[in-house]
Image (cartoon, rainbow, N blue to C red):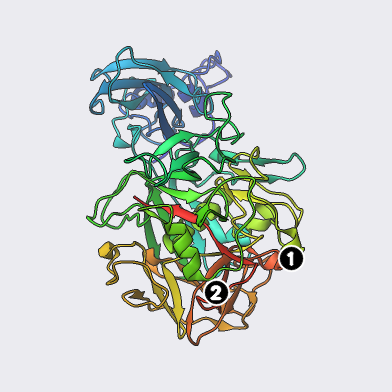
Amino acid sequence: MAFMKGPLASENRAGMVKLATVEEVLEGADTNKAVTPAGVKAVIEQAVSAPAAITNRSCVRTGNSYALTWNDPANDISRPACVWAGTLIVRKEGSFPTSPTDGDIVVDSTTRDAYASTALVDTPAEAGDYKYRAFPYSTGGAYSNSADNNFDRWVIGYRKTLTESAPDYRISYLGTIAAFTPGRMDFAEGAFNYGSWVNTEIFSQEFIRPCMLYNSDAADGLNGTVAYYLDPDDHTKKFGSEDASDVSNTDFPGNAMVQVKTIYRKVVVGDGHVDKYYSNVKVDDDYECYNSKQADGTYAEYWYAPMFMASLIDGKFRSLAGQTLNKSKTASQERTYAQANGDGWDMETWADDQFFGEMTELLIGSTSAQSKIGEGVTSGGEASLLATGTTLDKGMMYGSTSTTAAVKAFYRENPWGSQWRRMVGVLLVDGVWKVKMTKSTVDGSEANDYNFTGTGYITLDVPAPSGTSGAYIKDITQAGQYGSFPTVMTGGTESTYECDACWFSNSGTRVPLRGGSAVNGRLCGPAYLSADNVATDARWSFSAALSYHP
């Protein structure tokens, strides 16, 4: 039975005196109020109850320095009661501490959330592989020994209610982030407000950050390795210095890319809703990361997405700032130009597209990306196409209400608007969706490489698109780990359901494109899909972008 709010007793035989409430006793308030036996009992009970685990923990390593942020647990006035008194951070080399005395105490923090936004930076005297664990403790001296206190594991999730039409109610947060405030662009201030997502692990520099990545033009053995990281707020500079970067340098042997650390994903399809969970560890066999899954079944630590749409320079696609956008190439030509960067380089993949689409929904808590982040270059036609790199000083997320200015999401410029993004790994063949989540057959497909025919692809049991081609999406079908597909294009609008549109043709082999172009206005967005074009179609509004998968 939980403690009731209010006074601990209704009267006192010595006369009318002020009595402490349960909350005041548990908070340890100095009220000069009488404490009844019930209050004493509450204090005794708290000694046997440990606090909950910390939340929003993050550990970012730079050299031999470790920057830790976290939120301390709340008090619990249920039975048995618990009042948080402090959090010990313990460090150990090689493995996680198992108790408060199993390692070196880094800090004993007694101010709640002191390191929620300002990181605790620890630099051990000797270099090594250090592991950190928090031990929150109560006023009664009971420590939390939950594995969730390790600075290595987190699980977050959201629910997408498919029957809900209002975009802001279509997405709801689950578990430890249930009370989070979503992020969104402050158009008046010209800056993105991250809400409760500030300093959370999944959107930290540890998991998503801009870099310069070598291609095969670099010295032997450097292809696919990071030359250096970029300043997240000014990409013209190298991270941690005032030195100029090569973000616009066509002589640099590589490309400006977004490094994404492996994030595992679990999808649970329910009745009228889909729950999606993400973790930095493979919690169980239901968690998967096709973006970094290699042919032998292991996972690369990182995979890479493009910062910019492709520019054709000396016979190969490049992702660099200050360049003219590629246009009017076929799908096969685009793939050839992308692969010219060397082993591991290709066009963007369907798996990558699904990741960023879901991260967008997670961050903004809505399916209306244009209203929460920005319109993008969605008017003006071919003449409005901008050179790459107009958002170099705009951070990770940026947008505006202008329909002629670039939008930016997760350091990726123009993820919608400007030009359609063509990719590999998804096809609509005579109304049947076919996918391939990895280049190898480790995803269960039978083809050893991507293609534009669907041969060897995984055939999905997903309804063929229906309704009016080019209309707003109303219904979608989640095919488990294989992605989300528009199914009904009747009844949706720019401000309901997915808030984006879909073109389709249920005859022939169609190569889907994402995002929309500079003539599509409010139809555009991360869910906007065109599946009515063949691989040989070449227009100014069609293009592609690079990816690198080890």
Work out whether 336 lies above or below 1.
Answer: below
Given residues 350 and 340, the one toward you in this image is: 340
Q: Position of residue 38 (x, y in %)?
A: 41, 26
Within 10 Å of the Cα at label 1, are there few (<14), some (14-19), or many (20+) other Cα atoms?
some
Q: From this viewpoint, is residue 460 visible?
A: yes
Image-based side of 393 in relation to 208, left or right: right
Quadrant location of residue 442? Answer: bottom left
Work out whether 357 lies above or below 460.
Answer: above
Q: Residue furthest front?
A: 314
Question: Is disc 2 in contact with disc 1, using a CB cutoff of under 8 Å?
Answer: no
Q: Amino acid at mark 1?
A: Gly
Q: Secondary structure at mark 2?
A: strand
Quadrant location of residue 82? Answer: top left
Residue 475 is labelled as 2
Q: Position of residue 79 (x, y in %)?
A: 38, 35
**Exactly how many numbered labels are in the figure?**
2
Spatial separation of the CA atoms under disc 2 and disc 1: 29 Å
Q: Amino acid at mark 2?
A: Asp
Given residues 324 and 508, the one toward you in this image is: 324
N-terminal of the pair, mark 2 or mark 1, is 1
Image-based side of 358 in relation to 18, left or right: left
Residue at 55 percent across and 46 percent down: it is 410
Residue 303 is labelled as none
Q: From this viewpoint, is residue 71 visible?
A: no
Q: Secondary structure at mark 1?
A: helix
Given residues 130 and 497, the one toward you in this image is: 130
The N terminus sits in image quarter: top left
Within 10 Å of the Cα at label 2, are there few (<14), some (14-19), or many (20+) other Cα atoms?
many
Q: Please identify, in this view, whether the residue under mark 2 or under mark 1 is nearer the observer.
A: 1
Residue 381 is labelled as 1
